Amino acid sequence: MGVIHLPASTPAAEIHDVLATEGALVIDELASPDVIDRIAAEMAEHVDDTPLGSDDFSGRSTKRTGALIARSETARELVTHPLVLDVAGRLLHQATKFQIHLTQIISIGPDSPGQAIHRDEWAFDFFPFPSDVHPQCNTIWAMTDFTEENGATRVIPRSQDWEVDMGHQVSETVAAEMTKGSCLLYTGKVYHGGGANRSDVVRSGLNLTYCAAWLRQEENQYLSCPPEVAAELDDDLLKLMGYQIGAYALGYVDDVRDPLAALRGSTGSMSFAAN
Ligand SMILES: O=C(O)CCC(=O)C(=O)O
Ligand SMILES: [Fe+2]
């Protein structure tokens, strides 16, 4: 069975229901081509300068370019996309808050073999999260069309309850083909992997992932986004980056100051109850 596609007008509750059952789905053309083109232009020099991956999992013909919040003003629109945040909040409902986990353009070059099939939540040191606990919610926005030939993400729909098994094969997967601007939403539990690129063009996807605010972020937002850039950002985006108390007392600064207040230069202790 293939990956389900839903129109961008689908209500968040319905998208969440499909995500919870299928583990992955595509929202067609959620971003306009113009937004994608602006992100590509803002990131072009950084993508050019990015080295190829240094191991098979990262992909030796694949580039992973991060720090999108600092480097691309337009990418901030996708990081804070209201429909995605609404769905992520539903999937991660057991956590008081959630946060950005990583921002990364994944450019899979021609002749790249397929990535090993995996679960993204294994990043948390392979901690055996129960099947009904979702630590993360993920997106990949297509910056080029995603085709079977050029390395569209491969997914095993409905695999989220399966046993831990690092030996799943590409033959068990389907390609999440989608047009530029479409968004693949998938849980941290669904088995998937970057596809082999058998075309002569680069497949480019913007991976924006979210996790419960009590977990360590994969991309360190406090260093990936320099403090002088962070100081110019909106409060809501900063909170999503981790400038908020993750749960009671998680992430305070020095004398129990709220991280956002500390960034803004305010003194005085925070009240835990207010967070
Ligand atoms: O690039 C892709 O399509 C997926 C990459 C991926 O799953 C990963 O790096 O964890
Ligand atoms: Fe992955």
Image (cartoon, grey):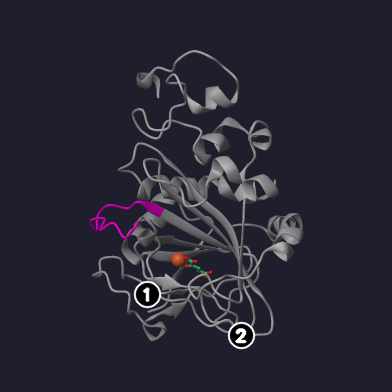
Q: Quadrant of the C terminus?
A: top left
In the picture, the disc for residue 111 is 2
Mark 1 or 2: in front is 2
Image side of residue 124 versus residue 85, left or right:
left
Q: Which residue is mark 1?
A: 156
x and y, in percent, of residue 25 in the image: 44, 65
* Count of picture labels: 2
Looking at the image, residue 44 sits to the left or right of residue 193; the answer is: right
Q: Is residue 63 visible?
A: yes
Residue situated furthest top in the rendering: 268
Decide: is 184 above or below 97: below
Q: Which residue is painted at 49% across and 13% down in the image?
A: 268
Q: Position of residue 198 (x, y in %)?
A: 60, 86
Q: Which residues are magenta?
A: 125-136
- For image coordinates 35% across by 51% down, the residue present is 135
Residue 162 lies, with reference to residue 216, above or below; the image says below
